[in-house]
Image (cartoon, rainbow, N blue to C red):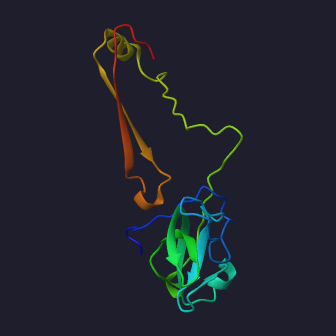
Amino acid sequence: MITFVNTVLVSNLKAENIATAAPAACDSMNAVSTDYGKFVIMDMDKGTFVTAADAKKADRIKIGLVTNKNTVRRGPKDIKYLPIIKWSNVIAMDAIKSVNASVYPTGDAETEDTVTIDFSKIDAMTLAKFAEGGKRLIVRLTFKDLPTRYRKWTESYEYVTEVDDTA
């Protein structure tokens, strides 16, 4: 059982954007590769980049994310600017029980989530106390959509009421 995660690779591209070959080289040190943000898979036994379908046949793989930074590789006759890849640990294929890729739902108008607090079930006497001012309200949110910290990730927000505050 996995009890912690060392590296999380996140891309802003859709899940189907997995490079099938080595990432494209750049023209200069400051240029960004056309494969920036794509995932790459390397067969550790062969030392080659493979597709997702071919990765199922491998014994050990590494998953990488192409970054926007480059490194210089000097050859006897040329200079190449290769993108730096952020790699995962080596993964033995027999250790994989399942694979899950999540895609954040996007739309035309991306907005932050909002939370609405309902004061309709609070009695009038308590609301009158809040209206006096100087009373602390603390709202604690428990996030249930983080699988690595199930029901343990909380955020607390505090508000001190002012005179004549209403719900």
Residue 161 lies, with reference to residue 13, above or below; the image says above
Residue 139 locus on image (x, y percent): 38, 33
Q: Residue lying at the far top in this picture: please name it.
A: 164
**Residue at (71, 40) in percent of width and height:** 108
**Residue at (62, 72) in percent of width and height:** 23
On the rendered image, what quadrant is the C terminus found in?
top left
Question: Between 129 and 28, which is closer to the camera in this rendering?
Answer: 28
Q: Residue lying at the far left in this picture: please name it.
A: 134
On the rendered image, what quadrant is the N terminus found in?
bottom left
Question: Between 26 and 41, which is closer to the camera in this rendering?
Answer: 26
Q: Is residue 162 left or right of residue 122?
A: left
**Residue at (34, 12) in percent of width and height:** 162
Q: Residue lying at the far front in this picture: please name it.
A: 77
Residue 151 locus on image (x, y percent): 41, 52
Q: How many dots with numbers?
A: 0
Residue 63 locus on image (x, y percent): 54, 75
Quadrant assignment, res 163: top left
Q: Is residue 117 left or right of residue 132?
A: right
Residue 148 lies, with reference to residue 51, above or below; the image says above
Residue 137 lies, with reference to residue 53, above or below; the image says above
Question: Between 24 and 3, which is closer to the camera in this rendering?
Answer: 24
Question: Between 8 and 69, which is closer to the camera in this rendering?
Answer: 69
**Residue at (62, 65) in percent of width and height:** 27
Residue 83 locus on image (x, y percent): 55, 68
